[in-house]
């Protein structure tokens, strides 16, 4: 875990300084430009018997072109007998910060958070649908984020725009699919599938609406087992409304025969 936090500190320093890294000749496709997707975040645990239906509900949203889903495994149910293989302490910190801003007294699983502005029980598909329709009807203005992966180099382009407040630029490394056999706890004996599992995350810059380009090293995300990267533009010191987002595949290019 210490190695993971070291990688995050290196990433943050490089991004804030605008440091470029050497790119190889192999090129991955750039993320499509267009309206930012709605970000749906699920706080879940392998040790929570109520969570598998929510994991499935999130998976059902993943392929929607207007939605970016992220799974944040939390560790506070590890005491029930099974240590979550993907949980990080900072994931529960993020959930706690969300609930404080949303006026909730504590944390629970499964919980879904929508664009940082609303939440519901993660297995309640009717409520999920209602909140997605509410966000769509609200026509919240989003900042376009352009991502491009080239070999080991990830380029993030932010346009000049009026933000109204300082925005946290959050980098998220995630794994698109994972299957885990649970050996103990409330889900003992089950094989559970997870989608878009967060493997590392950090705020890499504070942004005030100036045109800016950040360059990041994809090798750091791959070292965490991630195959995708996402950028979230978020108010409230990184735990408020999300005003822009984008994601891109970062799987290592195939070797030339």
Image (cartoon, grey):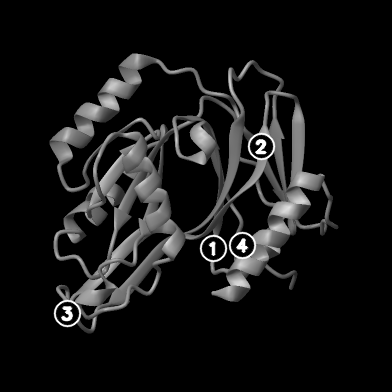
Label 1 with label 4: CB-CB less than 8 Å: yes
The answer to whether the residues at label 2 and label 1 have Cβ atoms under 8 Å apart is no
Residue beneath the point at 20% across and 82% down? 184
Q: Which callout, 1 or 4, points at the residue further toward the start of the chain?
A: 4
Look at the numbered discs 2 and 3 and tell me whether their residues touch, using CB distance below 8 Å: no
Q: Residues within 10 Å of mark 2 (few under 14, many from 20)?
A: some
The residue closer to the viewer here, 147 or 236, is: 236
**Secondary structure found at label 1:** loop
Q: Position of residue 84 (x, y in %)?
A: 33, 73
Residue marked by disc 2: 206
Name the residue carrying label 3: 188
Q: On screen, 239 above or below 138?
A: below
Real-space CA distance between mark 4 and mark 2, rounded to the nearest whole angstrom: 21 Å
> What residue is disc 1 on?
226
Q: Secondary structure at mark 4?
A: helix
Q: Nearer the viewer, mark 2 or mark 1?
A: 2
Which residue was labeled with disc 4? 221
**Label 1 Cα crowd, 10 Å radius (few <14 / some 14-19 / many 20+):** many
Does the rendering let one see residue 253? no
Mark 4 or 2, nearer chain start:
2
- Lower position in the chain sequence, tag 2 or tag 1: 2
The image shows residue 104 at horizontal and vertical percentages of 25, 39
Answer few, some or many: residues within 10 Å of disc 3's Cα (few below 14, many 20 plus, some between 14 and 19): some
Does residue 9 appear left or right of residue 69 in this picture?
Answer: right
Q: Is disc 2 placed on a helix, strand or loop?
A: strand
């Amino acid at each position: 875990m210490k190695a993971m936090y070291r990688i995050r500190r290196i990433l943050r320093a490089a991004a804030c300084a605008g440091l470029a890294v050497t790119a190889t000749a192999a090129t991955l496709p750039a993320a499509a430009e267009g309206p930012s997707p709605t970000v749906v975040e699920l706080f879940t645990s392998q040790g929570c018997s109520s969570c598998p239906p929510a994991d499935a509900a999130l998976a059902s949203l993943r392929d929607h072109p207007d939605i970016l889903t992220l799974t944040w495994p939390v560790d506070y149910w590890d005491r029930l007998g099974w240590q979550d293989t993907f949980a990080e302490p900072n994931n529960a910190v993020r959930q706690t910060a969300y609930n404080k801003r949303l006026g909730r007294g504590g944390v629970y699983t499964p919980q879904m958070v929508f664009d940082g502005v609303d939440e519901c029980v993660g297995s309640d598909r009717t409520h999920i649908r209602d909140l997605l329709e509410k966000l769509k009807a609200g026509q919240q203005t989003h900042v376009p984020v352009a991502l491009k992966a080239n070999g080991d180099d990830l380029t993030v382009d932010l346009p000049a725009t009026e933000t109204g407040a300082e925005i946290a630029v959050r980098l998220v490394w995630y794994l698109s699919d994972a299957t885990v056999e649970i050996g103990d706890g409330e889900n003992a004996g089950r094989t559970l599938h997870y989608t878009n599992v967060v493997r590392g995350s950090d705020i890499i810059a504070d942004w005030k609406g100036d045109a800016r380009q950040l360059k990041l090293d994809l090798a750091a995300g791959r070292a965490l087992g991630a195959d995708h990267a996402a950028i979230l533009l978020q108010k409230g010191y990184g735990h408020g409304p999300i005003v822009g987002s984008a994601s891109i595949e970062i799987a290592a290019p195939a070797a030339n025969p």
